[in-house]
Image (cartoon, rainbow, N blue to C red):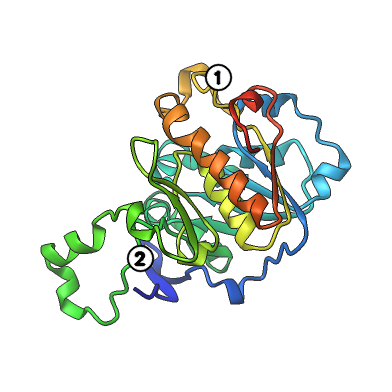
Amino acid sequence: MLTPKHIDIKTSNGSYSIKTFDKQNMSQNLKALSVNIFASGPSIANLKFEDDLLSSPSILVNGSLTITAEHDFTNIVAYVISDERFIKHNAEILEHFYTGQPLYITKPVIEAIAVNLPHLIEKHQHSITIIYPVDRPIVSTDKVGFLNSLPLIKKIGNKKLSLADFKDHPDFVIDTSGYPKPIGVSLNIEQGFVEAGTVAFVAAQLAYTLGANQINLYGIDLINSNQPRFYEKQDNAAPCKLDKAITDRIVPSFDLLGRVYGEHGVNVKNHSPVSKDLFNNI
């Protein structure tokens, strides 16, 4: 199934054509570069943001965008949001801190932005790129016509596929053994990314696809996921489903990613002092 080159998004301010990920047309090229991914674990608050760190290619995810208020990042190559619930709980973060950085988001996320922050799409439409999970591909409506409005067609288009269906696909490595559900990793997110319960996993697949040869992970704390993220307070913390997913999904997925990318010459390193002992391959 071919991914459409763009999707049409309607807001209260108008209709906009937003591009989908096309590796050949990406302005961001991280070939042979070391990339830092900053997640939102509490350990970020203790990280020393020195000049070398701030000037290196950086990918921010979800609420880690707020660290730009305190630190002068000079090379933000991507800001990634994969779950629309982040917009519903934290729209004010984009309102106050998003300034046009390359924004990689899913279709449900941009639909949530269209409702909550329509002016952001109007102002920054050319900075936005749509990405998608491999098991929920973007369905083109160009050739479907009026059938797309029928409930059955919508149901088919929204159906979640199984990762096992991609076991033999050259752009994915899927492991169906030893876990409650299959896990995997993408070698090219133009064909979709694999989810693991945390947006940092999506960001790592983006970094790999864009050509990075070293991926550094900060703020992937996991163990203390019951604590507020560094930008939250206890009374306004958004729901977090990390705890039950850590051992069954997140840790084995990152270990698979570290092994697979390592076999392709890309080193992945977890810099969180909190979760470093959970992993074998990062």
Report the front residue among 23 and 73.
Answer: 23
Q: Residue 210 in the image: x percent, y percent? A: 64, 63
For the residues bearing labels 1 and 2, Cβ distance under 8 angstroms: no
- Upstream in the sequence, badge 1 or badge 2? 2
At label 1, the amino acid type is Asn
Residue 249 visible in image: yes
* Image side of residue 114 versus residue 39, left or right: left
Instruction: Give the labeled residue for mark 1.
Output: 224
Report the front residue among 35 and 164.
Answer: 164
Instruction: Give the labeled residue for mark 2.
Output: 138
Q: Residue 229 in the image: x percent, y percent? A: 56, 27
* Image side of residue 193 versus residue 269, left or right: left
Q: Residue 257 in the image: x percent, y percent? A: 57, 46
- Number of labelled discs? 2
Q: Residue at x 52, y 33 (%)?
A: 251
Q: Quadrant of the N terminus?
A: bottom left
Whether residue 113 is situated above or below residue 28 in the rendered picture = above
Whether residue 222 is situated above or below residue 36 in the rendered picture = above
Whether residue 227 is situated above or below residue 252 in the rendered picture = above
Q: Residue at x 68, y 66 (%)?
A: 28
Crowding at dot 2, Cα within 10 Å, few <14 / some 14-19 / many 20+, comes out as many
Q: Residue at x 47, y 69 (%)?
A: 20
Which quadrant of the view contains residue 124? bottom right
Report the front residue among 11 and 76.
Answer: 76
